[in-house]
Every structure is written in C-alpha cells, then in structure tokens.
Amino acid sequence: MSAVETPENASEESKDIPPRSPFTHLIIIEPLGLLYGSSGRFLSPENLVGRSGSSFPPTAATLSGLFAASQDENADILRLMLAGPFWGNTDELTSTKQSFYVPTPKNYLVKNEKIVDKLNWNGEHEEWRNKDNETPVDKYDNNTWLAINNWNNPKEVKKNPWKFLAHLHPRLELEERHVIRNHEEQGSLFLENSVQMETGTCLVYLSNTELKNGWYRFGGEGHMVDVRCEPICQSLTDLLKKSVGNSFALITPAVWGSNRLSKRVPVYLEKRDRTFYQQEEPIPENQEKNVWQLEALFTARPIPFRYRLGGKGETKLLSRGRYAVPAGTVYVLKEPIDKPWQDWDVNWFPKEGPSLKRWGCGLALPLVE
C-alpha cells in the first residue's frame, strides 16, 4: 500500500470535520518589550535560574488564543489552521518576496552560519553520507534557521535572534510602592524567565484566517505585542503547495501516535479503520500500524509538547504532556507522498479535542536532491 493510499473506511470519522483551506496569511508578532520564555514549570526559590522549563518561541496553539479572543461570536473558528513558530526581520515581510526563517533540516551541516556539507541517505550502505560518499566526523552548529526563500538553494543560516533573561516581578502593597511586608501566604518576589528579541525581528506564523491588526497580550505573564496580518505572496504559496515526495523535512514539531503513545511516524488505529488490518493472524485490540513505510530518519531527541489545560473548576493545570519529533527532522520514505502537507489525511494526525493538524503539526517541505 502506498504511503498516500487511504482505506475507504479510514475517513469516516473525518466526514464531520470542516475542510481546511491552504494557508493564506502571515501573522507577524512584534514584541513591545519582553516575552515569556517558560513552559510547563513554575519558578520557585529552589529553581531561581528557571531555565529547566525554557520554551521559546511560543507554539501555534498559543497564537490560537488571540483568534478566540478577537473573533466575533458568529465567527467560524472551527476552520482555523495555524503553523509555526518561525521568525523574521520586520522589513522583509511586506514585500512581494516575503522571507522569514524556518528550522534548518538536520542533514545540513553548519559551521559559522554557513552550510558546509549535506548528508544524503545511502541505501546500499544504510548510512547518511555526503557527496564524497563519506560520513563526516566533526562538531557542527545546532538550532539554526534557514530563510524560506533559500529553501531550494540553501547556503547560509541564522542563529536564534533572542536571549533569555531573568526578570524579577515584585508583589507590591496595594496602597504604596513597597513590596508586601507580610509574605507568609505568598512570596513578595516572582522570578520570570523572559525573552528579549533583537531589535527589528519578530515572530511569524502561517494562518488560513485573517487576524485583526492591533496590540494583544500574548503568552504567559500577559506581555504586549504588536500583531500585523499580511497576505502570503505567490512564491510562498507555490512552495507550500508542492508535494513532499519521498524525501522531506519538518519545519514544525510533529506529534504522531495515539493518545497513549508518541511515535516517530503517523499511525492508524484499529478502531478508526478495521479493514486496514487484513492479515492472517488477528491483531490485538488498539494495536497500531504505521502509515508510512520508513526507509531512513535523521532526527534528534524528542521534545516535550503540551498545549491544553485540564482539571475541574476555575483552577486549570497543564494536561498530560506528549513528545514531539523536533522540527528539522528529515524523513526518507519507501513510497512517495504525492500531496502537499495541506492535503494529508486528517486521520494521520492525533486528535485531542481538535485535530493536531489545526496547529500545523508536522508541516513539511520537500528536499532538493
């Protein structure tokens, strides 16, 4: 079965899901000061540095809160689809040739912001090798970003344009500018793990829904940002509509698997498609089967992924976390996927409330051989 073939019964649950249109707008977020840089953990006197829970840039799920707060009651928010995070220079996002930065594919070897080599999968030796048929052994830069305009001809990359800062919040008396003297119930100081972006840079997300321009509170601690919405230029639209083929890279983290387990590739669950498991021996209840026939994978350690709140009553807590395949992961499949990411079967994506495709889970672009 090809990677893009979907059994007839596999889409039964997706019939009631509204169709999702291609991305049409860039959401440009320019901070008006510091941004929040923590996720999943609260800072405490025992953890004053507060870096163990660092998480930046904010995920696309964080951006969805702005849409929920700004849209009218009659707005069709169910059709919303987002993807990110990315970043860019503010003066490069209003022209006809929009350019912003996406995670560099991990098979590109980087030194001093230059791509010095590229690895390709060698099926004969079952190894990742360069053009000289060698496997380099050296130290290379990580966590770099590639301009999306140079996706098909990559030469240079950029490093993160932000830095983490420890930002101290005092709790003041109600009627005077003095820290609270009686702090038996709560402390007088709160240490926030904040982020400062370089001047002239901004966060960028893809959206299929327009967002009103203006100032918004974004992320933890309610930091203010200036939000601008721009239509996507034609060259970017053409790139996003390309079929990924059998060799592609993720530009956003991907959560695959069931609600119980996280996987490296999408899976079909038996309860979604019983006709998919036509084998001689019966398959146990809830056993999973991979959608893609994987030939090679170039990735790094999984990253924590949590976006929704749980618990009863007014106090909400972060729900059980998942593990995501990091952005930049390179897939090589035995059977090509002759569709762009927007047309991938919604049943490939886990569903926790909304489908994770709504948050741009595993957005992929084809790699140039």
Image (cartoon, rainbow, N blue to C red):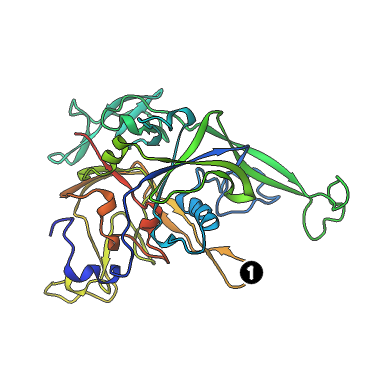
The location of residue 322, given as percent across then percent down, is: 43, 59
Relative side of 52 to 186, left or right: left
**Residue 222 screen position, x and y as percent:** 63, 49
Q: Which residue is painted at 48% across and 54% down in the image?
A: 64
Q: Relative to 200, is 347 on the left or the right?
A: left
Going by the numbered disc 1, the residue's amino acid type is Glu
Q: Measured from the top left, where is residue 311 in percent x and y? A: 56, 70
Vertical position of residue 346 compared to residue 101: above or below: below
Relative depth, front residue between 38 and 349: 349
Mark 1 crowdedness (10 Å alpha carbons): few <14, some 14-19, many ≥20: few
Q: Residue at x 77, y 57 (%)?
A: 186
Counting labels gives 1
Q: Residue at x 38, y 66 (%)?
A: 259
Quick check: 70 left or right of 367? right
The answer to which of 138 and 7 lies nearer the viewer is 7
Q: In percent of the image, x 37 and y 62: which residue is there?
A: 355
Q: Which residue is mark 1?
A: 314
**Residue 131 position within the rendered picture, expressed as x and y whole percent measured from the top left:** 19, 27
Looking at the image, residue 113 lies above or below residue 324: above
Compared with 111, 282 (above or below) is below
| Tag 1 secondary structure | loop
**Quarter of the picture holding the C terminus:** top left
| Quadrant occupied by the N terminus | bottom left
